[in-house]
């Protein structure tokens, strides 16, 4: 098998979709195919298309080479995946993954550190459908077996958590799931399959918000779920029944971003570690929460399972509350204040994880999440230094 850097360049570049001949790839990038109706030359051709609707052009909602190229590329990047489906947002991807594994009367386990909208979907939609949810401590590891009920069908993991960055013992949880016949879903947006090959760890459904590192330019909303062979047919069926569809233009943006993602991730990691190391030395900072820092509670698991780190982490302040953080963030020159992450730009966001947690409580001062972009780290450090000076001057 070729290396990940080679796969990320060549994945999904099928010569059948790029007008290649005799095995040549043709144009470098898959053209954008905007289509709803597909025309057939005969009844026989129509019937053949309906008999195998996923083997070629059938109807726009079934996809065109624009969608197929991205799906194929993402599948190749997570060795062991049987296929990938696309969704208009990361939340839609997680919702369909949950609907794939759970039916009315079932029970699912969800990490307490899960993405906020995932919890809202579980609490408001799954509950209404008669699917029970238990939130578990993300550090539970193999102890999760004690929470498995007779009707438990799946476990949803997110490692690390995107607010408080707990690293889960994915292999231990997967081992329990397989022994008990449960499906596993992993939100792998922070690491992507390049840094955490989820299928190799035994995950059944691996989700990404392609909005983040795959898109990489803060200009697209797309989600994906890659499935193991056992779950691929049901994921595909559930996706079709819910009418999920992603525009060819958005797919093209994701494919463009994908080709440089390996390089960008390495730079995000290097920049973030430099900024995080500096923050550790600042007298106003209580704690830096970054799994790739020696001394972080998740460092040993991160070192064992991951192939690198991305640009998202957090830090807490020794004094003050969220209400005081405007002095820090309002006048930052190089950090935008906003949701999402994974783009080329740096972002900052004060967060309150205990507002939604039920199984665990986050302990520490005011929590600031940062995404470190592709700017010069020295400029970002100077910006934060000035912001922290404004912050401490309040007290």
Image (cartoon, rainbow, N blue to C red):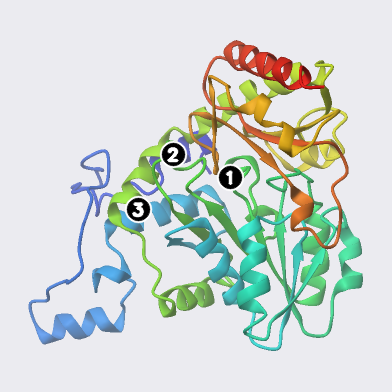
Left or right: where does residue 354 sit relative to residue 326? right
At x 24%, y 73%, the residue is 59
At x 40%, y 69%, the residue is 244
Residue behind mark 2: 218
- The x and y percentages for residue 364 are 86, 39
- In this view, the mark in front (1 or 3): 1
Marks 1 and 3, how far apart at CA: 18 Å
Name, please, the residue furthest toward the front. Answer: 394
At x 52%, y 72%, the residue is 235
Left or right: where does residue 111 sit relative to residue 71? right
Left or right: where does residue 355 sit relative to residue 98? right
- The x and y percentages for residue 83 are 48, 63
Earlier residue among tags 2 and 3: 3
Judging depth in this view, the residue of 337 and 1 nearest the camera is 337
Residue behind mark 3: 69
Q: Quadrant of residue 219?
A: top left
Judging depth in this view, the residue of 313 and 117 nearest the camera is 117
Q: Secondary structure at mark 3?
A: helix
Marks 1 and 2, how far apart at CA: 17 Å
């Amino acid at each position: 098998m070729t290396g990940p850097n080679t796969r990320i360049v060549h994945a999904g570049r099928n010569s059948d979709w790029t007008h290649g001949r005799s095995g040549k790839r043709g144009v470098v990038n898959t053209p954008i195919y905007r289509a709803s109706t597909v025309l057939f030359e005969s009844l026989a051709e129509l019937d053949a298309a309906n008999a195998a609707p996923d083997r070629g052009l059938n109807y726009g909602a079934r996809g065109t080479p624009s969608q197929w190229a991205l799906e194929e590329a993402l599948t190749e990047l997570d060795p062991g995946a049987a296929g990938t489906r696309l969704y208009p947002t990361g939340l839609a991807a997680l919702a369909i993954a949950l609907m794939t594994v759970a039916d009315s009367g079932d029970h699912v386990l969800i990490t307490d550190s899960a993405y906020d909208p995932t919890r809202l979907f579980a609490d408001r939609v799954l509950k209404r459908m008669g699917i029970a949810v238990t939130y578990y401590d993300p550090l539970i590891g193999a102890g999760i077996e004690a929470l498995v009920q007779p009707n438990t069908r799946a476990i949803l993991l997110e490692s690390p958590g995107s607010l408080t960055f707990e690293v889960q013992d994915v292999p231990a949880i997967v081992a329990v799931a397989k022994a008990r016949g449960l499906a596993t879903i992993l939100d792998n947006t922070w690491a992507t399959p390049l840094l955490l090959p989820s299928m190799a760890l035994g995950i059944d459904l691996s989700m990404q918000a392609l909005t983040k590192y795959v898109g990489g330019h803060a200009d697209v909303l797309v989600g994906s779920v890659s499935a193991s062979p056992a779950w691929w047919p049901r994921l595909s069926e559930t996706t079709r029944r819910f009418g999920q569809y992603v525009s060819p233009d958005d797919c093209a943006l994701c494919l463009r971003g994908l080709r440089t993602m390996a390089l960008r991730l390495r730079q995000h990691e290097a920049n973030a570690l430099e900024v995080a190391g500096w923050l550790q030395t600042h007298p106003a900072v209580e704690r830096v929460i970054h799994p790739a820092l020696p001394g972080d509670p998740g460092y040993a698991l991160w070192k064992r399972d991951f192939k690198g780190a991305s640009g998202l982490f957090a830090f807490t302040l020794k004094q003050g509350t969220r209400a005081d953080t405007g002095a820090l963030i309002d006048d930052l020159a190089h950090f935008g204040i906003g949701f999402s992450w994974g783009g080329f730009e740096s972002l900052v966001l004060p967060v309150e994880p205990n507002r939604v947690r039920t199984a665990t409580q986050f302990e520490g001062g005011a929590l600031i999440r940062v995404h470190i972009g592709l700017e010069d780290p020295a400029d970002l450090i100077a910006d934060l230094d000035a912001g922290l000076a404004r912050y401490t001057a309040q007290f």
